[in-house]
Amino acid sequence: MAQLGQVKPTYQLALEIAAGARLGHVVVEDDTIAAAGIKLLKQAKAGRATFLPLTKIRPYRGQNNQSLSYAQGFIDMAVNLVLCRPEHEKIFSYVFGNTVVFETLNDAKSHLGKQRIVTLDGDLLETSGAMTGGSRPKRSSIRFGTLVQGESHEIKSLKQRLTDLEELLSRNQEKLQQKSEQIKQLSHELTEARQSGREQQLKRQQLEKEIQRLQGQQEKLSLQLSRHKQESETLDHKLTIIAAEIPPLTIELQQKQDRLKQLEESHSHSEWQEIQTLIKSQEIQLQEREKELRQTENKQQDINRKLSSLEEKIKENQGKIDAHKEQIVKLENEKIDINKQLETINDKVSKLEFLFQELTQKLGETKKERDLTEEKLTTIKKNHQQKIWNLEKLETTQQERKESLITLNEEQESQQNELPDPLPEVPLLSEIDETTTDLTPHIEQLQKDIRNGQKRLEAMEPVNMLALEEHEKTQERLNELTEKLTTIQGERTELLLRIENFTTLRFRSFKESFDAVNENFKNIFATLSQGDGYLKLENEEDPFQGGLNLVAHPKGKPVQRLSSMSGGEKSLTALSFIFALQRYRPSPFYAFDEVDMFLDGANVERLSKMIQQQAQQAQFIVVSLRRPMIEASQRTIGVTQARGAYTQVLGIKL
């Protein structure tokens, strides 16, 4: 939390004391990340931490005592003294609550119990009446950043560079999003084109089968036509023979009739009877010939009718064959167009994927450069803060030395005042013996001063003469650890970039598969149940943190929960999802065990047709007791229970 705000050096101590342990709380985007962090700490046994989710944290809503703003020594509310981003304001409102800042303890103690108060010296007054203060403890390594009026040119340039990198990162992310949308659109078009190509291929195969059937039927009709033509030629030949036999018989009949008249006129009874008998026999033969002629003509008419019918059927079949051939040519042209479109789309997808990879690489480099710049800026800020602290320490030391110097000057003045005025003259060496008696008091005073100086030297002990050597070793160790830390931070940045790239690729692959399966589910569910349905993610922004819902709306019924659906509706919904997955990525075969048990006749027929369509891509083994499903199968095997615990395979007559 401390890294998200900056304060002036004057208020730094007071605000750090007011925040207390909350300075080290970890700020995250939402409660999901907080839960993942707690789980990670448990797994690594790395201790405990407090997380503050931005989406869940509640800022302070209590009433503030407005009268304190006019009190002597009042500065401001603690939360108002922190400079932060707008989205982080509620975090600091939660941390500081109703805490106010006063200049001194004397100004604040008269308002004890009214509101939580902290002073610039770090004294804390609670609303319960408790007061905390004293000497300054060793400050934690977690501190607020400070606002310095005169930032160095390097810091300003780094901040500007960081701003430029963030803008570049934002632009690259926008471009990346646009390219992702284009890839998604092209992938959708590619899927539709492939689906259309598969449908056209299926339609072409059906037309080819229809042409083969019609060609077989045409061959049979041609054989019948040739056979009927042979029969017609035979009958024409017989008709020609009979037609050739009729004129002589007619002439002979006329002669016989003339002869009959002559006989009738001659009144020869016996000869007349013979002739009459001959005439009857000739008439019978003529009737037989005429009857045979009529039968032959009827047969010829039947054959002609059949020939006409066959010729019409042949013409009709030929027309169908020509139409199917034209349709096949049209489908071939459409297939060529679709292949061209597929090639164009594949080229666009390849270019976009290459551009996407370039943008991803550029984005990773930009993020890496941003992280390095942030690390450098953080290091400079730390060094700058350390210099400020050193400066404050030096100022404190300087102040102490000034006070010590004043004390020493005062002591010197007091000692000078104690000296005799004028100072006594130092006797010559030759006169020492004569004046030894007179110097004894001065010698005692000097010895006393020497002892006092010796005591002051002893008070300054012990002096560690190895401190400089230990300082050099510690500095070398610090430099070594700093290099290792830099290496580890670089490796960490690289790992984070790889993780982010893998996460992006995983999300893109999942989204592509999900969109394709969702589109297949919509089409298949509409075909099976004549309703509408779709797939819905519980967490669309991060699908791996949530589940998947099947939203099904059967025809003529409202949207229902799965538990409220009938058995048939549940079966159709589950089968639609299975077929959607199978259409996107088929398996070698599928085994269904009485999936049509809860379906009515119409739904069983639709399901059987769907399985027939899907059987073009995979093999289906279906266990069923329903006639529409059995009749739609390509191969049927009957299984019944034999004697004992054995089963028996039987043939089925459909």
Image (tube, rainbow, N blue to C red):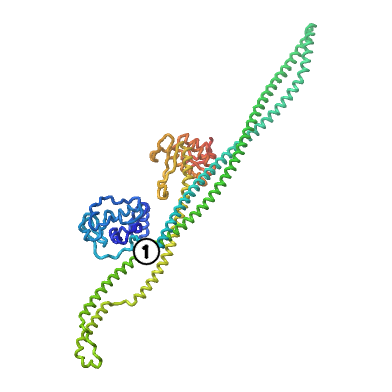
User: What is the x, y in percent for residue 495?
Assistant: 44, 59
Depth check, front residue: 509 or 232: 509
User: What is the x, y in percent for residue 119?
Assistant: 25, 60
Q: Work out which residue is located at the far front of the displayed protein and give it.
A: 422
Q: Using the rendered view, name the quadrant where residue 138 is placed.
A: bottom left
Amino acid bearing label 1? Lys
User: What is the x, y in percent for residue 205?
Assistant: 58, 40
Residue at (21, 59) in percent of width and height = 109
Q: Is residue 600 left or right of residue 276?
A: left
Tell me the quadrant of the picture where the N terminus can be found.
Answer: bottom left
Q: Is residue 538 left or right of residue 267?
A: left
Depth check, front residue: 542 or 388: 388
Residue at (67, 32) in percent of width and height = 223
* Residue 145 visible here: no
User: What is the x, y in percent for residue 21?
Assistant: 30, 59
The residue where tag 1 is placed is 382
* Residue 654 visible here: yes
Q: Is residue 308 left or right of residue 459?
A: right
Callout 1: few (<14), some (14-19), or many (20+) C-alpha neighbours within 10 Å? few
Disc 1 secondary structure class: helix
